[in-house]
Amino acid sequence: MALKALDYDTLNENVKKCQYAVRGELYLRASELQKEGKKIIFTNVGNPHALGQKPLTFPRQVVALCQAPFLLDDPNVGMLFPADAIARAKHYLSLTSGGLGAYSDSRGLPGVRKEVAEFIQRRDGYPSDPELIFLTDGASKGVMQILNCVIRGDGDGILVPVPQYPLYSATISLLGGTLVPYYLDESQNWGLDVNNLRQSVAQARSQGITVRAMVIINPGNPTGQCLSEANIREILKFCYNEKLVLLGDEVYQQNIYQDERPFISSKKVLMEMGSPFSKGVQLVSFHTVSKGYWGECGQRGGYFEMTNLPPRVVEEIYKVASIALSPNVSAQILMGLMVSPPKPGDISYDQFARESKGILESLRRRARIMTDGFNSCKNVVCNFTEGAMYSFPQIRLPPGAIQAAKQAGKVPDVFYCLKLLEATGISTVPGSGFGQKEGVFHLRTTILPAEEEMPEIMDSFKKFNDEFMTQYDNNVGYSRM
């Protein structure tokens, strides 16, 4: 029988190679159990509103007015919306060519890009050019656009931290490139060793691969660490010497849960390094409305800023962006609000500050509850979540559990996470979905469940884990770092 154009056997092989563990086997099984009536706690994905985080009031008021501009003509609008929200809605509508239902420029609304540039300049202390900022449907779309321009074929390699967020491995597979791993050191709180970077590049080149770009995720996903300024400086020097474009995934820059290592952007460090680095390193930085205390994942708003890319390259990236015509306009407005929130003295400032501070302080407490909870469990060790939204504990599986997983035809940490899901309803992601050293096993969970539910969730995890370890413990030894 003749194959059809879209039979499995005739699919693009890159699509078949593409894996995305965050919505993989565990998530699908959790969805089945939910349909059967089991209570599922979806900690597999950084999706704050799905786990009960309330949207910030002011940005939703502004977007509501932009979505329904006829409300602005209602004489009673001032009774429902504060005057500063009304003024901001009118401001954003004036930037569009026909409201939220009209396409914008493929790079995003010029007025919003100007607000993003002003935010970057305030944050870093160095100028930012709105013409080098593209608004995107979430940071993920921006990453995919840039990787699409970098990767020319399987001979091109992208340095990616392992453990890594599978957006990178999936997109590199989809585009036919080669992922070149560099390993973060769990014993050093997921630190980065430049010597390991050099080894990774040398090994890739010995296999005929041209390494073209390097990805950093800061704060880290799934590992939750924050890069120090010294570490970022080392990375930028490395990229300068190796002629690599640095892709700075900085979407968790608001999510910091300690005071020792505040977020510092790659752009700021680069500019402070001065010549030749500040003019020689090519950098693309990404941000989003999906994380931080905003958590507006479903709105799909993001941006990337390009530093030291030649004008002709920027023109080609614009051409790629133009294929999709326009990023989501309501999300562009949310991005404008994120980079230019209410200021002291504004009517909505006190409420905005109270809401955002409350979310961040709660996340800081939840990070501590979860880390301490994991470290109280048998055969579980977990570095403190310095930033981002995740814990990434190492699960030291007894040989009996590894053997049981093999008999079930499962990777050991997938086996463990499936058992956890069935017993407790907690849906996580196995560490193997992010990459990890051979013979070492992890899981990733968000720190996003409601704070009042966190002790019960961690008690449930501990009860399952300790019973699992007792069941499979045959006193022979454990998987370990």
Image (spheres, rainbow, N blue to C red):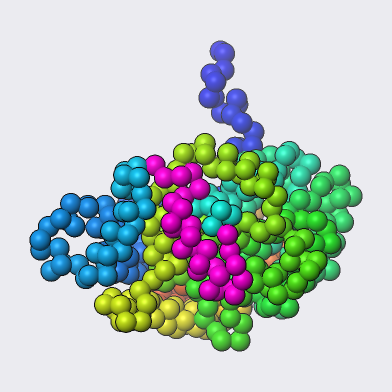
Which of the 4 image quarters holds residue 397?
bottom right
In the rendering, at what x and y percent does residue 63 appear? 30, 58
Horizontal arrangement in the rendering, residue 277 relative to residue 249 (left or right): right
Segment tinted magenta in the rendering: 103-129
In the rendering, at what x and y percent does residue 374 appear? 53, 78
Quadrant of the drawing holding the N terminus: top right
In the rendering, at what x and y percent does residue 345 appear? 32, 82
Q: Residue furthest right?
A: 206
Q: Is residue 380 visible?
A: no
Which of the 4 image quarters holds residue 58?
bottom left
Q: Is residue 254 visible?
A: yes
Residue at the location (61% across, 82% down)?
A: 261
Answer above or below: position of 420 versus 379. Answer: above
Decide which of 458, 474 is in the foreground and name it. Answer: 458
Magenta stretch: includes residue 104:
yes
Residue at the location (39% across, 42% down)?
A: 103
Decide which of 451, 134 is in the foreground and name it. Answer: 134
Which of the 4 image quarters holds residue 344?
bottom left
Residue at the location (60% across, 26% down)?
A: 9
Decide which of 78, 225 is in the foreground and name it. Answer: 78
Residue at the location (70% across, 69% down)?
A: 270
Answer above or below: position of 8 versus 367. Answer: above
